[in-house]
Image (cartoon, grey):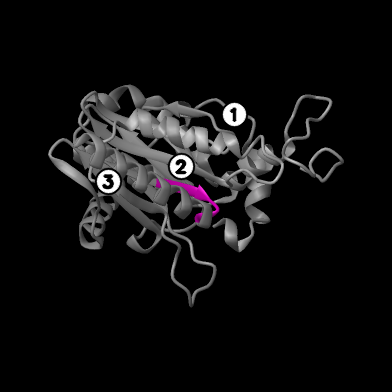
Amino acid sequence: MFRNQYDTDVTTWSPAGRLFQVEYAMEAVKQGSAAIGLRSKTHVVLACVNKATSELSSHQKKIFKVDDHIGVAIAGLTADGRVLSRYMRNECINYNFTYESPLPVGRLVVQLADKAQVCTQRSWKRPYGVGVLVAGLDESGAHLYYNCPSGNYFEYQAFAIGSRWQAAMTYLEPRFENFMDSSREDLIKDALISVRETLQEEKLQISVCTVAVVGVGEPFHILDQETVRKLIDTFEIVREDGSPAPEPGDAAPDLGEAAPAAAAEEGAAPMDI
């Protein structure tokens, strides 16, 4: 993407009918470290890649608890993600105080999408440069939503955002039909394998990934490092013993964005991690 005369204002349309500021915000999501979500009938698992701007610094937190039944994972500008997660937390508190019941996941996602959409039609605002995966459980079951900086939202069985998201989707797409009947442990395993697919030459370790779970009888929480370590060790042993790994023939069709995403990774600014 290059600067042009139609990208100085978020409310300025190009002759081709595009809003470049919104597209730039969506590009910021692709430059952030990967975040992945999977759901079954009873559980939703979120996983993300932890990246630090320096070997001497800690990584940015990418998964946030919103309520006992809702949590989010973000990719893009973490500062924007913190603001939106705080907004969602306040909405849950207000709804619970008024109606004495948990806020339905779908309603919260619509409110978040409306908040993002307002920033695409106000000249004194800018779009939120963060993609949000919303995992939740309510009376209608388990849900996984993706909220886009454009104000759109979609419900998914499994989805990945951030850098090298195509690699994770290549693993997830051939297997998504089995996720609905998957156990909690199988979902976590698939999430860890998906995270591993987004790492280029780096080995999957507890220092580079975070996993969170919400499900029936299980409030949203982030798994402790020891639990994740055991799961990763089990996964590595399975792969070393020759267990079936993702077959090249199972790869999903090329989505046509691999090259731009790779180029964007190279020029990612520290604040986009």
Residue sitting at x 46%, y 37%? 112
Amino acid identity at mark 1: Leu
Give the image location of residue 223, x and y in percent. 24, 54
Residue 185: image x %, image y %? 20, 41
Q: Residue 49 location in percent, x, y? A: 43, 54
C-alpha gap between disc 1 and disc 3: 35 Å
For label 1, the crowd category at 10 Å Cα-Cα, with few meaning under 14, some 14 to 19 and many 20 or more, is: few
Residue 143: image quadrant is: top left
Residue at 58%, 56% in the rendered image = 272
Residue 75 drawn in magenta: yes
**Which of the two residues, 159 or 26, is positioned nearer the viewer here?**
26
Which label is found at residue 130?
none
The quadrant of the picture occupied by the C terminus is bottom right
Residue type at mark 3: give it: Asp
Quarter holding the N terminus is: top right
What segment carries the magenta color? Answer: 73-78
Which tag, 1 or 3, sits closer to the chain's start? 3
Which disc number belongs to residue 132? 2
Q: Rounded to the nearest whole Å, what is the CA distance between mark 1 and mark 2?
A: 21 Å
Let me know if residue 158 is in the magenta part.
no
Image-based side of 160 in relation to 67, left or right:
right
Q: Are marks 1 and 2 in contact (CB under 8 Å)?
A: no
Helix, strand or loop status at disc 2: strand
Residue sitting nearer the eye, 63 or 171:
63
Crowding near the residue tagged with mark 2, few <14, some 14–19, many ≥20 C-alpha atoms within 10 Å: many
- Residues 263 and 17: in front is 17
Outermost residue on the right side: it is: 5
User: Residue under circle 3?
Assistant: 67
